[in-house]
């Protein structure tokens, strides 16, 4: 790296944009730690809030069913804001919007901790989700400017490792906090971590923004689409007329949004990126695999408790190997993706995940559920082997200037898939009776969906002797 580049302050953009060789050490390590800590903070907050719902219901004197909005508001804000926040990051600069998101998340955490009523808490959680969207959309995009391309796969792998561990540890950490303190401390602990992230974020590269203005009407249509889609999907099974009306409204909003944005150079919905074949295939594969993953996450507890007769504690222990295996596989997959074609890695990961889910669905466990532990390890390892290379491919097949949009689309694909998986299980529970039928069929369908995701990834593999065309400005690494 040239001496002048090292001498620049974190606030001084490189004359040709961020250095393609990444940041120098130790600044690179501080910047990466800032991004990963922020992402873990957002993931952990979503995981620990679930366990507090009964306590919140008792303390605030509200029906338990109403407390579900604490989770729904957070997830709804995330999915609504991901694409606009990605576009805003490209306009104003990735680091500026990322740190603004961390600040908003931390302030909203204080609002959650001080909430005297459930509506206050739900509103604060919605604001938290808006801040979290900035972290999720721009965090991984910033890693592209922090690390050189040859190390990006490993960086995404370590990021996936941290997320997997946070997801696995969330309920335990939440239970530990509730054992010694009231529920507001679940949110108050975010504040000091957020402050540390704000300080270390000074090490992040100041990626210059394009100053492109966001279209307010497009932002409103985007919000209307995702809000109607999520609420319609959640209600269509129990209230078909209301759910169908919401889904129709979602379709109309999407049609209006696409029509308004399709001629823009950098549209809010990244239609330009979806024209890149490799990026488009990665998005489709991601939606399929996350649909299967969420369907399995809903089906497995019912399968363990109702189908196999396990108590809730034992059922929880049987699910732990999945995130732990994902945590092991993610950094391995990250390093491999810097050397091996990501299409093959994603295909193998999808196949392993599908095999684990299929075995869980059809294996005659009887009175001995222990083989399920091996199936969960297979699922977790396959999921980690798929996710990291797929995310890397999404980032490297688009120009650096569109990294914010790619990050937003990455998060959107995940949340759309998870919503679809939850809806799939809701429909199965509505149509099928008995404690075993819906979970087993759900696991079988999840296996089919994840297998389809892996096979979709194979479409990115170039034919023997051919070189895959590069549609993006920067050439992606080999194998996609």
Image (spheres, grey):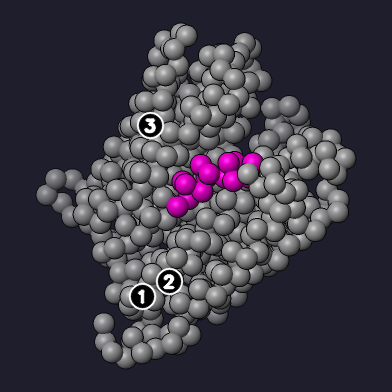
The earlier-in-sequence mark between 3 and 2 is 2
Residue at 78% x, 43% y is: 56
Is 245 one of the magenta-colored residues?
Answer: no
Secondary element under disc 3, as helix, strand or loop, is helix
In the drawing, does residue 68 fall left or right of residue 339?
A: right
Q: Position of residue 460 (x, y in %)?
A: 29, 47
Q: Which mark is residue 377?
A: 3
Of mark 3 and mark 1, the one earlier in the sequence is 1
Residue at the image point whose x is 42% and y is 56% from the top: 159
* Residue shown at 26% from the left, 82% from the top: 1
Region rendered in magenta = 162-175
Q: Quadrant of residue 212?
A: bottom right
Circle 2 — which element? helix
Residue 113 in which image quadrant: bottom right
Tell me if label 1 and label 2 are in contact, CB under 8 Å.
yes
Determine the residue located farthest toward the left in the rendered image. Answer: 465
Q: Which residue is mark 1?
A: 26
């Amino acid at each position: 790296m040239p001496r002048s580049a090292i001498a620049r302050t974190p606030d001084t953009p490189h004359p040709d944009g961020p250095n393609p060789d990444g940041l120098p050490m130790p600044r690179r390590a501080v910047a990466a730690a800032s991004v990963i800590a922020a992402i873990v903070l957002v993931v952990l907050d979503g995981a620990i809030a679930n366990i507090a719902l009964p306590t919140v219901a008792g303390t605030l004197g509200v029906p338990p069913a109403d407390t579900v909005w604490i989770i729904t508001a957070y997830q709804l804000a995330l999915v609504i804001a991901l694409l606009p926040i990605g576009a805003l990051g490209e306009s104003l600069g990735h680091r500026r919007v990322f740190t603004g998101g961390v600040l908003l998340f931390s302030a909203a955490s204080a609002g959650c901790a001080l909430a005297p009523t459930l509506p206050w808490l739900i509103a604060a959680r919605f604001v938290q989700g808006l801040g979290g969207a900035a972290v999720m959309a721009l965090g991984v995009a910033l890693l592209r400017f922090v690390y050189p391309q040859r190390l990006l796969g490993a960086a995404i792998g370590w990021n996936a490792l941290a997320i997997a561990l946070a997801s696995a540890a969330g309920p335990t950490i939440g239970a530990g906090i509730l054992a010694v303190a009231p529920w507001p401390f679940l949110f108050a602990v975010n504040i000091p971590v957020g402050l540390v992230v704000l300080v270390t974020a000074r090490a992040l590269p100041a990626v210059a923004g394009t100053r492109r203005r966001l279209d307010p009407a497009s932002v409103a249509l985007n919000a209307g689409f995702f809000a109607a889609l999520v609420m319609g999907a959640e209600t269509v099974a129990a209230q078909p007329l209301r759910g169908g009306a919401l889904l129709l409204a979602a379709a109309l909003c999407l049609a209006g949004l696409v029509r308004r944005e399709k001629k823009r150079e950098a549209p809010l919905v990244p239609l330009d990126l979806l024209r890149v074949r490799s990026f488009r295939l990665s998005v489709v594969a991601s939606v399929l695999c996350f649909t299967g993953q969420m369907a399995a996450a809903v089906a497995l507890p019912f399968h363990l408790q109702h189908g196999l007769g396990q108590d809730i504690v034992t059922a929880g222990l049987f699910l732990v190997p999945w995130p732990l295996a994902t945590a092991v596989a993610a950094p391995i997959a990250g390093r491999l993706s810097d050397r091996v074609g990501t299409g093959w890695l994603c295909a193998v990961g999808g196949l392993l995940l599908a095999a684990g889910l299929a075995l869980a669905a059809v294996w005659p466990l009887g009175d001995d559920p222990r083989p399920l532990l091996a199936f969960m390890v297979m699922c977790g390892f396959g999921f980690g082997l798929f996710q990291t290379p797929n995310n890397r491919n999404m980032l490297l097949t688009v120009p650096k200037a569109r990294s914010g949009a790619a990050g937003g689309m990455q998060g959107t694909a995940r949340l759309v898939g998870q919503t679809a998986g939850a809806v799939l299980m809701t429909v199965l529970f509505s149509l099928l009776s008995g404690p075993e039928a819906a979970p087993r069929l759900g696991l079988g369908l999840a296996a089919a969906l994840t297998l389809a995701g892996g096979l979709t990834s194979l479409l990115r593999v170039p034919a023997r002797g051919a070189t895959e065309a590069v549609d993006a400005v920067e050439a992606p690494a080999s194998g996609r």
